[in-house]
Image (spheres, rainbow, N blue to C red):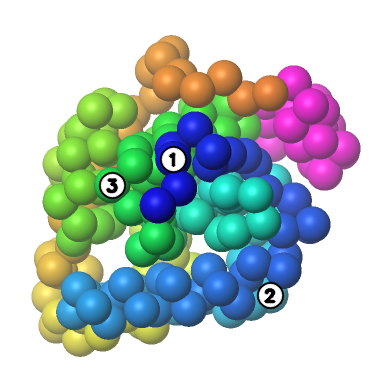
């Protein structure tokens, strides 16, 4: 078993695209084992997230250990940190929290005025969300961006969501309203990389 200190958690870039297929398989296997739903994503989708500095990856040397990515909705007024997964070989080492802390801090740095929300059925994710300041909310408190809800169609629980007119599903809705606290500092080189990607000063404002 790898020791936690041997695992690096960092903002992904295009050099990490070689891990995308492994990431997708790990996510699908975990959903199957738990019997839970998941919004399906393509290789191209996750690769783009990496290129746009909207993904976090955990690596032990060249071995994949974990991953998560960021999505924005409603003209960047809402943000989600999604697809959190840790490879079975690296579980119970605190890596999920390290990934969650970095994606949360990255989202708060890039979109400081956005509300960050989560739809999850995982107890561990709910616990991490609560520690970061998320509060349970109703689905009405989430984004009304149709693109977000369209992404739920790949989940096995989508019929439940549709039947309840998007008022309720298996997942619990949680929301973070912006505050000043950041659990992890985003490295300056990542800030500079984001600046080049966006072509404008960062952190970016959600009304730009």
Q: Which residue is mark 2?
A: 44
Q: CA distance from mark 2 to mark 3?
A: 30 Å
Instruction: Tell me, yes or no, whether the highlighted magenta stretch contains residue 84.
Output: no
Q: Which residue is mark 3?
A: 92
Indicate which label's residue lies in the foreground, 1 or 2: 1
The image quadrant that residue 37 belongs to is bottom left
Give 91 or 155, whichever is nearer the viewer: 91
| Span colored in magenta | 188-208
Which residue is located at x 68 percent, y 75 percent? 44
Pointers 1 and 3 in contact (CB under 8 A)? Answer: no
Q: Position of residue 19 (x, y in %)?
A: 64, 67
Chain-order first, disc 1 or disc 2: 1
Pointers 1 and 2 in contact (CB under 8 A)? Answer: no
Chain-order first, disc 1 or disc 3: 1
Which residue is located at x 74 percent, y 31 percent? 190
Q: Which residue is mark 1?
A: 3
Q: Residues within 10 Å of mark 2 (few under 14, many from 20)?
A: few
Q: Position of residue 152 (x, y in %)?
A: 36, 74
Task: Give the left or right position of residue 4, taking residue 207 as reference.
Answer: left
Instruction: Tell me, yes or no, whether the highlighted magenta stretch contains residue 191.
Output: yes
What kind of element bears circle 3?
Answer: loop
Give 58 or 172, whichever is nearer the viewer: 58
Chain-order first, disc 2 or disc 3: 2
Q: Which mark is residue 42?
A: none
Q: Position of residue 127 (x, y in %)?
A: 19, 39
């Amino acid at each position: 078993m790898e020791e936690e200190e041997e695992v690096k958690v960092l903002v992904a870039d295009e050099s990490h695209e070689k891990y995308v297929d492994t990431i997708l398989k790990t996510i699908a296997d975990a959903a199957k084992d738990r019997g839970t739903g998941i919004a399906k994503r393509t290789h191209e989708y996750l690769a783009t997230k990496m290129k746009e500095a909207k993904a976090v990856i955990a690596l032990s040397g060249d071995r994949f250990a974990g991953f998560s990515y960021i999505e924005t909705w409603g003209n960047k007024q809402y943000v989600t940190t999604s697809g959190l997964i840790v490879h079975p070989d690296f579980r119970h080492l605190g890596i999920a929290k390290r990934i969650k802390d970095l994606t949360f801090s990255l989202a708060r740095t890039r979109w400081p005025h956005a509300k960050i929300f989560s739809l999850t059925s995982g107890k561990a994710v709910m616990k991490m969300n609560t520690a970061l300041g998320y509060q349970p909310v109703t689905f009405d408190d989430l984004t009304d961006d149709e693109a977000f809800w369209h992404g739920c169609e790949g989940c096995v629980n989508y019929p439940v969501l549709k039947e309840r007119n998007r008022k309720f599903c298996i997942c619990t809705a949680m929301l973070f309203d912006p505050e000043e606290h950041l659990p992890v500092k985003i490295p300056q080189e990542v800030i500079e990389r984001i600046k080049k990607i966006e072509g404008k000063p960062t952190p970016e404002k959600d009304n730009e």
